[in-house]
Image (cartoon, rainbow, N blue to C red):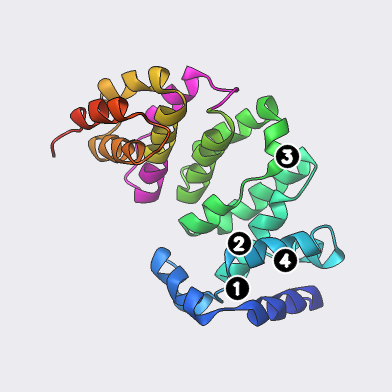
């Protein structure tokens, strides 16, 4: 049975719903039933999360899992993003990840507090990647992509992600994004992983495709990367 806080939040989400955006979201997330999508636009969800973060309603909502609607899950992720305590944030992520069932909800949540705790975060990223659960693995890779490809970069992260083998499309797609971003930000360190074909063929080619689409990769680098595509 829903709490009064859940009812209030759900009613507010329905008030913000957009039928056209509902249809659009359903096309982007084909494994999510359209009946479970309200159609709240992402900027509106973020604004609402900012408005209610830290309130009793928000705390009650974060305890109420699983949620009924896709938009509620996205709001849940945005509320976690706004948490300020590292340990509480990790605990909230661990409670939430088992209920994440699509790439969009997975990728939308990127807690700000993680940017201040790079050393402490790494063991959790390792645990998420080792979980064997599609969207938990994807989330772990995403956290490495978001937080460790700039000043906190290490070649060991490339090695770790290159070692992942999966039949799951949404895991392999995130691996490709990771290497495409690494090529944009750490080209010289990342290139040997592409030259050495250290990813499976599909992921290798997808990483090159995404890197070539990046404005951060130079024209000459793009030309060379294209020559490294695997014919399948």
In percent of the image, x 60 and y 73: which residue is there? 68
Q: Residue furthest left?
A: 231
Residue 38, image x and y in percent?
56, 77
In percent of the image, x 80 and y 64: which residue is there? 52
Residue 32, placed above or below residue 216: below
Residue 17, placed above or below residue 200: below
In the rendered view, does 57 fall on the left or right side of 68? Answer: right
- Disc 4, SS: helix
Q: Distance between the residues labelled 3 and 4?
A: 19 Å
Q: Local crowd at mark 2 within 10 Å, few (<14), some, or many (≥20)?
A: many
Q: Which of marks 4 and 1 is nearer the N terminus?
A: 4
In the rendered view, does 175 fall on the left or right side of 4? Answer: left
Judging by the rendered image, the residue that carries numbered circle 2 is 74
In the rendered view, does 172 fall on the left or right side of 88? Answer: left
Residue 221, image x and y in percent?
31, 26
In magenta, the rendered stretch is 150-174
Q: Are marks 3 and 4 in contact (CB under 8 Å)?
A: no
Judging by the rendered image, the residue that carries numbered circle 4 is 48
Q: Earlier in the sequence, mark 2 or mark 4?
A: 4
Pair 4/1: label in front = 4
């Amino acid at each position: 049975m829903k709490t009064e806080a859940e009812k209030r939040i759900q009613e507010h989400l329905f008030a913000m719903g957009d039928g056209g955006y509902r249809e659009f979201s359903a096309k982007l997330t084909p494994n999510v039933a359209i009946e479970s999508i309200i159609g709240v636009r992402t900027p509106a969800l973020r604004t609402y999360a900012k408005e209610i973060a830290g309130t009793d309603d928000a705390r009650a909502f974060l305890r109420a899992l699983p949620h009924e609607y896709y938009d509620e899950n996205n709001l849940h992720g945005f509320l976690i993003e706004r948490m300020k305590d590292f340990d509480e944030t990790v605990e909230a992520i661990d409670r939430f990840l088992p209920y994440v069932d699509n790439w969009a909800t997975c990728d939308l949540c990127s807690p700000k507090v993680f940017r201040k705790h790079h050393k402490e975060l790494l063991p959790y990223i390792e645990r998420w990647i080792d979980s064997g659960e599609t969207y938990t693995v994807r989330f772990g890779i995403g956290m490495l992509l978001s937080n460790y490809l700039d000043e906190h970069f290490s070649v060991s992260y490339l090695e770790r992600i290159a070692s992942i083998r999966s039949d799951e499309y949404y895991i392999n797609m995130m691996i490709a994004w990771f290497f495409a971003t690494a090529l944009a930000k750490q080209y010289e360190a990342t290139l040997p992983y592409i030259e050495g074909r250290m990813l499976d063929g599909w992921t290798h080619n997808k990483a090159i495709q995404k890197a070539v689409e990046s404005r951060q990769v130079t024209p000459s680098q793009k030309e060379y990367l294209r020559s490294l595509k695997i014919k399948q």
